[in-house]
Amino acid sequence: MAMNANFDEGLKAAVPAGKKVLLLCRSGVRSIAAAKRATELGLEAYNILEGFEGDPDQQASAAQRRLALSPAALAAG
C-alpha cells in the first residue's frame, strides 16, 4: 500500500484538537493503518472492525459487529 505523503498534515487539519477521529475503509486494512498513524500523532483514533463490507453474520448482516469500535492501539495488538 502506498503511503499518502500528505496524510499527517491533512489529518491534523481535519480533526480539531481534543476530538476523536473515526476511520473506515472497505475491508478495515487501510483504516487500521491510518488509525495507528493517527494514534502515533497523538490523536484518539478508532477503526471500524472489518471495514464497511465485513463478513455477514447468520442474519446476513455485518452491521452489528462493525458497530463495535476498537481503539487503534488495542486493535493493532
Image (spheres, rainbow, N blue to C red):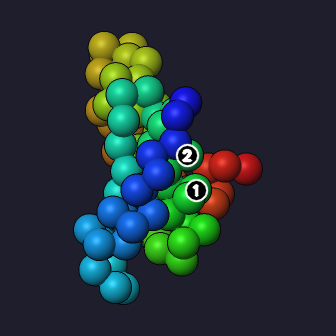
x and y percentages locating residue 32 in the rendered image? 53, 45
Q: Is residue 71 above or below residue 67?
A: below
As drawn, the residue found furthest toward the front would be 5
Say which amino acid is labelled 1: Lys
Which disc number belongs to residue 33?
Answer: 2
Q: Is residue 73 above or below residue 64?
A: below
Secondary structure beneath label 1:
helix
Crowding near the residue tagged with mark 2, few <14, some 14–19, many ≥20 C-alpha atoms within 10 Å: some
x and y percentages locating residue 42 in the rendered image? 54, 77
Q: How many marks?
A: 2
Residue 64 lies left or right of residue 32; in this view the side is: left
Which disc number belongs to residue 24?
Answer: none
Q: Nearer the viewer, residue 10 or 15?
A: 10
As drawn, the residue found furthest toward the bottom would be 18
Q: Is residue 44 above or below residue 49?
A: below
As drawn, the residue found furthest toward the right would be 77
Residue at figure coordinates x 52%, y 42% from the top left: 3
Where is mark 1, residue-wise? 36
Say which amino acid is labelled 2: Ala
Q: Nearer the viewer, residue 14 or 43?
A: 14
Question: The N terminus appears in which quarter of the rendering?
Answer: top right
Residue at figure coordinates x 48%, y 37% from the top left: 30
Quarter of the rendering containing residue 51 = top left
Quarter of the rendering containing residue 22 = bottom left
Residue at figure coordinates x 42%, y 56% from the top left: 7
Q: Nearer the viewer, residue 73 or 4?
A: 4
Residue 14 lies left or right of residue 3; in this view the side is: left
Q: Are marks 2 and 1 in contact (CB under 8 Å)?
A: yes
Residue 32 visible in the shown view = no
Quarter of the rendering containing residue 72 = bottom right
Crowding near the residue tagged with mark 1, few <14, some 14–19, many ≥20 C-alpha atoms within 10 Å: many
Q: Nearer the viewer, residue 64 or 33?
A: 33
